[in-house]
Image (tube, rainbow, N blue to C red):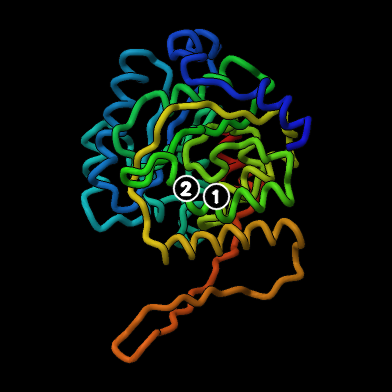
Amino acid sequence: MLEEVERWLTRRSWSAADHPPASVRGAADGTGVSVVLPALNEAATVGDIVATIRRELMERVPLVDELVVIDSGSTDATAEVARRAGARVVHRDAILPRLPAVPGKGEVLWRSLLVTSGDILCFIDADLKDFSADFVSGIVGPLLARPEVQFVKAMYDRPLGELPGQGGRVTELVARPLLNLHWPLLAGFVQPLGGEYAVRRSLLERLPFPVGYGVELGLLVDALHTVGLDALAQVDVGVRVHRHQDGQALGRMAAAIYRTAQVRLSRGHLVRPSLTQFERGPDGFVPHTYPVDTRERPPMCEIEEYLARRAA
């Protein structure tokens, strides 16, 4: 590890307990905080997350000003459950309708900038179990307390079933090697692909958003190049328990993440990629080929509707 990264780890790594909600709210000085949950068929978990944030960080301590669930087209009761728990629910397709939405988490996060107003945006995955408000207050805290910090990732243990620390397989097999080899300044991030992070709007609106699974890696790499390592930080929030995907879904995720890295390493010189996976059928292995979505949305500060909204 680079000496610069070792120094960064001591300066820019905290515990959630270092920034308790009451103390950082006092340091906010009018800074608005928006929490965004991208959700697709998460009726089993989204309600508990929303209810916890409302109770702990909007009613008990007024840290969060806005709580929005962006529904990506759920076929279950996600929207109803989230609304009943106290969130404002917006359907992805209702945001910027002149530009048809494409499937993908990054697409939803990008569009969320148009329907939120906070100076700080905090993204939380909607499939978390045993959710703690520390996931929000812990990563928002450094942004409120330290004006030089612009991007904060959560770090945590990720159990896989009964196995502690064995979750995050795409992180360990794909993202961490990529970052260590090509962006060694980011080698100190414990969970570079984690879906829980808080960022100043003034930075987010300047960054392109990969529309799919590559969004977390893309934002992290682009933030490094835009504001530098010392503006980035991470906070230990304990343990993250969520729904795990099967091996083939992880393969598609890994391909999108690898492609996101490729695009940043050599823009404009790559063929359109695909990923072929195999499943055993009655007559042997059957190939299934999936496109690897490499589309990206431009920085939000280039979108006319966003500029008009900010001017108003």
In percent of width and height, residue 168 lies at 47, 47
**Residue 127, quarter of the rendered image:** top left
Residue 135 visible from this viewpoint: yes
| Left or right: 126 in relation to 143 | left
The residue that disc 2 covers is: 168
Give the amino acid type for the residue marked by disc 1 in the picture: Glu
Query: Is 202 above or below relative to 169?
Result: above
In percent of width and height, residue 98 lies at 50, 59
Residue 303 visible from this viewpoint: no
Element type where label 2 sits in the image: loop
Mark 1 Cα-neighbour bin, 10 Å: few <14, some 14–19, many ≥20: some
Q: Write the residue at 75% across / 67% down.
A: 268
| Left or right: 270 in relation to 159 | right
Q: CA distance from mark 1 to mark 2?
A: 6 Å
| Viewer-side residue, 289 vs 124 | 289
**Residue 205, quarter of the rendered image:** top right
The residue that disc 1 covers is: 172
Element type where label 1 sits in the image: helix
In percent of width and height, residue 84 lies at 21, 36
In the image, farthest residue toward the front = 163
Mark 2 Cα-neighbour bin, 10 Å: few <14, some 14–19, many ≥20: some
Q: Write the residue at 44% across / 83% down.
A: 287
In percent of width and height, residue 172 lies at 55, 50
- Check residue 47 in the rendering and tell me which mark sits there, or answer none: none
1 and 2 marks in contact (CB < 8 Å): yes
Query: Is 256 above or below relative to 222?
Result: below
**Residue 295, quarter of the rendered image:** bottom right
Give the amino acid type for the residue marked by disc 2 in the picture: Gly
